[in-house]
Image (spheres, rainbow, N blue to C red):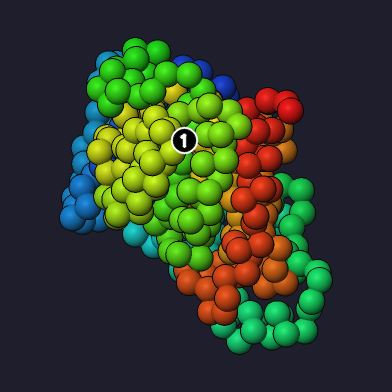
């Protein structure tokens, strides 16, 4: 299977992989993935082998590696075919790019399954039509945003969706081409108890009720609830729940994370700032150690739900109908959506006044975190 290149999307592919394993229990399933995501699949029950490629590795190099691959055990357990009896027989291409189609075609894998379109049908042996329920995440123009906020005062113009619009269905539909069930199941990333214990010890994670804070978003500022509101919400939670905090984020979020950590430290809250300090596996384990994770719509949001944490997810410029964490409709995940006639716009930066995220009050978010923690009073 050719995996996707972004963390959140990769997590949303796991139901398809689990369904494929269910349908093909004796088949060797190898996952081709970017090296930055290789650690995500450690110990995953649906994956037998991870084939990682580097950021600078070209399509011909990847194709050559696939073409010369041989099953690590016996031909009887492989997919069979290809250039030898123990090479790949089938490939599911999850991304929609021309490059990923070229990789499997140049690898001479006999059966190549992917979505139709994008000028790559000739590279696939089975170009799967797009589902009728699919909803594209079309970015609004700045002009559309301004027109909506000037003409629609009270109603929210959400992207129209139908049952099955969530992206997990998008990947399940491709897996169904190899006989897998298309019914959704919860995304899953496997994390061992020993990994959680190790990350607690390494970073000195506080004991007691642990709440994760993920205030960044790699996609752009339109996804980010204001930092001062994160701080205000965390301070209120500290006062009400006597909780401790773990701050998450990538290297680009270091300054933001320091701002949060500094502000919370003045309120005597126990804080562990992990932004930019963890490997991907350590991030998985630290998220699992949290009771609740308060987060913007970003990759770690999906990861937190998949490792078993309860999630409070904040949506403004994006659509929970399409990319909510966990299994669609799962009550364990609390979704808090901003109110604005232009939302969701799917833009990286707000062209007006950021009203979708500013409509999310501290009081509303604090109540959502307390709900997720299943605390009363």
Identify which residue, 102 or 317, lies in the foreground.
317
Q: Is 204 placed above or below 175 here?
A: above
Which of the 4 image quadrants contains residue 217? Answer: bottom left
Which of the 4 image quadrants contains residue 311? Answer: top right
Identify which residue, 321 or 354, lies in the foreground.
354
Residue 242 % position (x, y): 53, 27
Q: State the residue position of label 1.
A: 212
Residue 25 % position (x, y): 50, 18
Q: Furthest-right residue in view?
A: 154
Q: In which quarter of the image is the N terminus?
A: top left
Secondary structure beneath dot 1 equals strand
Q: In which quarter of the image is the C terminus?
A: top right
Residue 225 % position (x, y): 53, 57
- Tell me if I can see residue 119 in this picture: yes
**Residue 270 left/right relative to 154:** left
**Residue 166 left/right relative to 60:** right
Identify which residue, 241 or 371, lies in the foreground.
241
Residue 21 % position (x, y): 51, 24
């Amino acid at each position: 299977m050719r995996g996707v290149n972004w963390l959140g999307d990769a997590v949303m592919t796991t139901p398809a992989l689990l369904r494929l394993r269910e349908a093909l229990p004796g088949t060797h399933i190898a996952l081709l993935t970017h090296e930055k995501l290789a650690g995500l699949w450690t110990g995953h029950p649906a994956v037998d082998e991870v084939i990682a490629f580097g950021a600078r590795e070209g399509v011909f190099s990847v194709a050559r590696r696939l073409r010369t691959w041989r099953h690590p055990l016996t031909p009887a357990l492989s997919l069979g075919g290809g250039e030898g009896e123990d090479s790949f027989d089938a490939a599911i291409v999850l991304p929609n790019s021309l490059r990923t189609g070229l990789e499997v075609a140049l690898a001479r894998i006999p059966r190549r399954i992917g979505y139709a379109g994008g000028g790559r049908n000739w590279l696939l042996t089975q170009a799967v039509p797009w589902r009728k329920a699919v909803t594209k995440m079309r970015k609004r123009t700045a002009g559309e945003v301004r027109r909506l906020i000037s003409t629609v005062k009270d109603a929210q113009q959400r992207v129209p969706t139908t049952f099955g619009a969530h992206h997990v269905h998008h990947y399940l539909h491709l897996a169904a081409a190899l006989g897998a069930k298309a019914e959704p199941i919860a995304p899953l990333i496997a994390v061992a108890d020993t990994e959680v214990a190790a990350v607690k010890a390494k970073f000195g994670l506080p004991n007691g009720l642990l709440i994760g804070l993920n205030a960044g978003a790699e996609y752009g500022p339109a996804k980010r609830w204001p930092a001062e509101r994160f701080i205000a919400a965390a301070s209120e939670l500290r006062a009400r729940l006597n909780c401790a905090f773990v701050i998450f984020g990538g290297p680009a979020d270091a300054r933001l994370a320091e701002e949060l950590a500094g502000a919370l430290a003045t309120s005597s809250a126990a804080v562990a700032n992990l932004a930019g300090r963890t490997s991907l596996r350590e991030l998985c384990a630290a998220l699992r150690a949290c009771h609740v994770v308060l987060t913007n719509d970003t990759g770690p949001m999906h990861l937190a739900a998949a490792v078993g944490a309860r999630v409070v997810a904040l949506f403004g410029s994006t659509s929970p109908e399409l990319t909510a964490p966990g299994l669609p409709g799962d009550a364990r995940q609390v979704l808090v959506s901003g109110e604005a006639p232009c939302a969701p716009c799917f833009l990286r930066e707000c062209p007006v006044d950021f009203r979708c995220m500013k409509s999310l009050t501290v009081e509303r978010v604090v109540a959502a975190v307390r709900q997720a923690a299943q605390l009363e009073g």
